[in-house]
Image: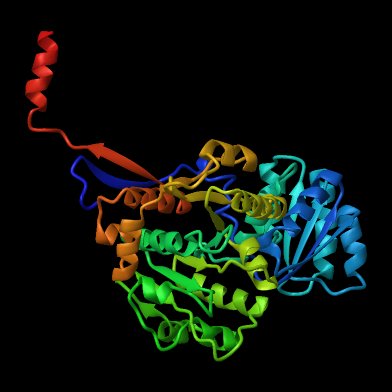
């Protein structure tokens, strides 16, 4: 990190087991129809949980009991969907015979996933010969189901779909936008990774001010005609702040009202995430259909709060909603901001964490001078002063959201050999 004399920084991938159930491997599924035929309640439950996950919100999923024989009977009279998932406990030869019957009913282009109860290599090879796309061994998990479907409809050789990280304040004025912008800038600098900030506070957004930019057009134009947005138009509407960081700026004019569509927000963020690894969403402090859906669909959520009772109540409400609706995702992250403000009564960090049932990802001390100067200069904290107390905290937040870890290698002093000899003499 620039400006630090005692350590060099390197960034490595965190092992998959530390990333929270491997949810990076299951990418969002496109608008397809999926019909499932189960034999056991356990498989039906895993499929139901997968169907309720944010990654499958665009897909139409129906679940039936009866296994492969029910599927054969159903498709003798009905067209087949994009994907069929069948569970079977039949022995190998009977299962293959039933699959041959199912194949006679399938339309061209239909994919099939078989869920079986035996780890049988010969069966697996026979299934592949018959054109079965995947073989799952029961019991499986909702994430295992989603990963299998994702592998069928997302090219493994293509660039992965970018991650959407949403920032929202538990109250207005808690500094959520400032934290959002500093974390985005840090991601682009520390990882040398392309980042887009989408400012969805269309009337009062501060992204342009914070990066000292005055864009003529931005995210409002994309939201007005989301179906027209492609890679070329996206590039025209973005404002480049550095080599790796671009902003989708808010218009910040009050001559019109901004009634956003949840579908429009989805489409714009989908195009953005197809083009960069990280899309950082700066959400205003309001509650609408589109803001709720954006939070529920995000890969990571950061709630910024100050240490008072109203922030605690609001943060708990948002946290409970997201944890209840996103069972296969990491819980939201909590950032406590402006801690230690002079003469202000505060709820302690420990009490705040205990009330919410999560540990704070970061605690940022009140520092009016550094943050005020950076804001007035149109700079980020580390950009203005790499030795500011908040600079390494923003790096920690960025690395946590990107599922990276920071390896600090201590530099050895020139006196190290001499000091080592003294220790040996003792």
| On screen, residue 223 above or below 126 | below
In depth, the one of 342 and 195 nearer the eye is 342
Please give left or right for residue 111 compared with residue 422 in the image. Answer: right
In depth, the one of 36 and 4 nearer the eye is 4
Q: Is residue 325 visible?
A: yes
| Quarter of the image where one finds residue 294 | bottom right
Q: Is residue 243 visible?
A: no
Where's residue 98, x and y in %? 85, 56
Q: How many marks?
A: 0
In depth, the one of 311 and 49 nearer the eye is 311
At horizontal 90% and vertical 56% (from top left) the residue drawn is 69
| On screen, residue 46 above or below 150 | above
At horizontal 65% and vertical 82% (from top left) the residue drawn is 259
At horizontal 32% and vertical 52% (from top left) the residue drawn is 391
Please give left or right for residue 106 compared with residue 404 in the image. Answer: right
| On screen, residue 141 above or below 158 | above
Q: Residue furthest bottom?
A: 255
Where's residue 426, x and y in %? 13, 8
| On screen, residue 138 above or below 158 | above
In this picture the colour scheme is rainbow
In depth, the one of 104 and 401 nearer the eye is 401
Q: Residue furthest front?
A: 343
Where's residue 5, x and y in %? 18, 43
At horizontal 48% and vertical 65% (from top left) the residue drawn is 280
Where's residue 320, x and y in %? 69, 50
């Amino acid at each position: 990190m620039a400006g630090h004399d005692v350590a060099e920084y390197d960034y490595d991938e965190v092992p998959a087991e530390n990333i929270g159930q491997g949810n990076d491997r299951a990418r969002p599924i496109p608008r397809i129809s999926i019909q499932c035929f189960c034999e056991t309640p356990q498989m039906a439950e895993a499929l139901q949980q997968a169907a309720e996950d944010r990654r499958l919100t665009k897909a139409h999923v129906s679940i039936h009991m009866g296994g492969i024989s029910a599927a054969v009977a159903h498709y003798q009279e009905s067209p087949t969907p994009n994907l069929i998932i069948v569970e079977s406990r039949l022995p190998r030869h009977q299962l293959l015979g039933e699959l041959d019957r199912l194949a006679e009913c399938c339309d061209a282009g239909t994919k099939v996933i078989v869920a079986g109860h035996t780890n049988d290599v010969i069966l697996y090879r026979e299934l592949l010969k018959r054109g079965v796309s995947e073989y799952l061994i029961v019991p499986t998990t909702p994430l295992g189901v989603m990963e299998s479907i994702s592998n069928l409809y997302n090219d493994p050789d293509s660039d992965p779909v970018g991650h959407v990280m949403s920032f929202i304040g538990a109250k207005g004025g808690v500094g959520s936008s400032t934290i959002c912008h500093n974390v985005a800038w840090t991601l682009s600098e520390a990882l040398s990774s392309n980042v887009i900030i989408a400012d969805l506070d269309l009337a009062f957004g501060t992204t342009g001010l914070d990066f000292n930019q005055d864009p003529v057009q931005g995210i409002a134009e994309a939201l007005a005609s989301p179906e027209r947005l492609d890679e070329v138009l996206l590039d025209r509407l973005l404002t480049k702040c550095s080599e790796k960081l671009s902003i989708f700026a808010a218009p910040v004019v009050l001559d019109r009202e901004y009634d956003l569509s949840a579908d429009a927000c989805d489409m714009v963020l989908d195009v953005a995430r197809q083009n960069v690894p990280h899309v950082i969403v700066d959400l205003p402090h309001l509650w609408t259909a589109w803001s709720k859906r954006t939070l529920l669909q995000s890969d990571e959520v950061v709630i910024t709060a100050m240490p008072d009772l109203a922030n605690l109540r609001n943060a708990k409400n948002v946290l409970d909603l997201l944890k209840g609706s996103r069972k296969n995702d990491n819980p939201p992250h909590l950032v406590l901001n402006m801690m230690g403000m002079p003469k202000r009564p505060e709820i302690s960090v420990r009490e705040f964490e205990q009330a919410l049932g999560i540990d704070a990802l970061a605690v940022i001390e009140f520092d009016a001078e550094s943050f005020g100067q950076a804001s007035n200069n149109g700079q980020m904290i580390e950009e203005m002063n790499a030795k500011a107390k908040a600079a390494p905290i923003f790096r920690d937040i960025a690395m946590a959201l990107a599922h990276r870890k920071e390896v600090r290698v201590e530099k050895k002093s020139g006196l190290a050999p001499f000091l080592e000899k003294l220790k040996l003499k003792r």
